[in-house]
Structures are given as C-alpha cells and as structure tokens.
Amino acid sequence: MANPAADNIRAIVDLERQARQQATLGERLGVRLSRTFGSMNFVALHLVALAAWIGWNQFAARDLRFDPYPYGLLTFIVSLEGVFIAIFVLIAQNRMSRQSDERDHLTLQVDLLAEQEMTLVLKMLRRISERLAITPEDDEQARAETLAENTNVYELVNTIREELPKNKSR
C-alpha cells in the first residue's frame, strides 16, 4: 500500500527539482551569490580586507600607500560592491517570490478541491442519514446545510475586500 506522506514528499521534491532546473543562469548565479554574501565567512573576509586596506594605507611608508585617508578608492569599491550585491539579492528575491506565488496557487487549488470534496461528502452523509432515518440535532442540521452549499470563491473574495480595512496609501 502506498504511503501518502511519502508520495507527497516525493511530489514536493520533484517540484523543487523542476524549479531549480527551470531557473535561468542569472537566477542561479544570483541565488548562489546571495548565499555567499549573506554568510559569516563573507563578513569575516570583509572585516579582514577592510582592516588590511585601512591599516596599509594608514601605517605603511608614504610612498607605498595607494589610497590615503579618506580612502576614496575604498569607498568607491565598497559602493560598487554594494550595488552589485543589491542586484543579486533582488534577483534571488524575485525568483523566491515567483516560487512562492506558484506554491500559493497550488495550495489554493488543493484547498478548493478539498472544499468541493467535503461539500460532496456532506451531501452524501445527509442522504445516508435520511435513508437511515437518523435525525440530527437542530444546530447540527442548520450548520450541515450551510456547509453543504457550494462555496462561491468570487463572493468570498469580494466579501473579504469589503470587510478588510482600506489601505489609504493606494
């Protein structure tokens, strides 16, 4: 007999593998560089490099100093590096956002299917109860009838939009 949890895990792994395979070279590079830039090793390397740069340009013999205080070249390089790091981080975030949107769509689809299945199950249980002459409690009956109705997703979305506080910045 198949193990549903194991099947689900395999499906998730397959979807993740497909997402990685479909990533562009730029996206893969962006993710890899973002992971590198976001590591403590990168911070430590930068601290050492910056301390060495400043130390050399502060304490070396005057004719060996290549970037005297206020370290204009260092400032330029660090600023340029910051721009590129920001770009790579944005590339990685865009990819993660796209994956998140796909997962949200999948979750919504599965939730809608589960809701439709449960509505059908409730209708079938009501018919079984009627055939067996099982009388539900009054509050159970009313709740079951409400839950057994088909859910109009568009109506729910409109209700949520009406009920949520309006964002004044829009």
Image (tube, rainbow, N blue to C red):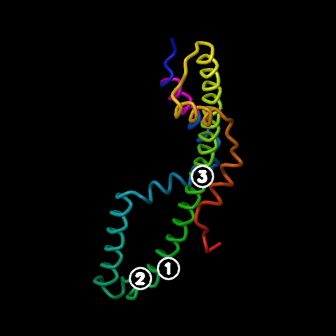
Amino acid beneath label 3: Arg
**Whole-percent x, y for residue 40 in the image:** 35, 58
Amino acid beneath label 2: Phe
Amino acid beneath label 1: Phe
Mark 1, secondary structure of its residue: helix
Disc 2: CA contacts within 10 A as few (<14), some (14-19) or many (>=20) = few
What residue is shown at x 52% (from left), y 34% (from top)? Answer: 139
Magenta stretch?
Answer: 6-14
Nearest the viewer among 155 and 43 is: 155
List the residue tagged with mark 2: 66
Disc 3: CA contacts within 10 A as few (<14), some (14-19) or many (>=20) = some
What residue is shown at x 59% (from left), y 53% (from top)? Answer: 97
Front: mark 2 or 1: 1
The label on residue 168 is none
Front: mark 1 or 3: 3
Mark 3, secondary structure of its residue: helix
Nearest the viewer among 16 and 103 is: 103
Residue 168 in magenta stretch: no
List the residue tagged with mark 3: 95
Q: How far separated are the C-alphas under marks 3 and 2?
A: 40 Å
In terms of sequence position, does the residue under pointer 3 or pointer 2 come before the other? 2
List the residue tagged with mark 1: 76
Q: How far separated are the C-alphas under marks 1 and 3?
A: 29 Å
Q: Is residue 107 above or below residue 144?
A: below
Q: Which quadrant, please, contains the C terminus?
A: bottom right
In terms of sequence position, does the residue under pointer 1 or pointer 3 come before the other? 1
Residue 12 in magenta stretch: yes
In terms of sequence position, does the residue under pointer 2 or pointer 1 come before the other? 2
Nearest the viewer among 55 and 140 is: 140
Q: Is residue 13 above or below residue 169?
A: above
Mark 2, secondary structure of its residue: loop
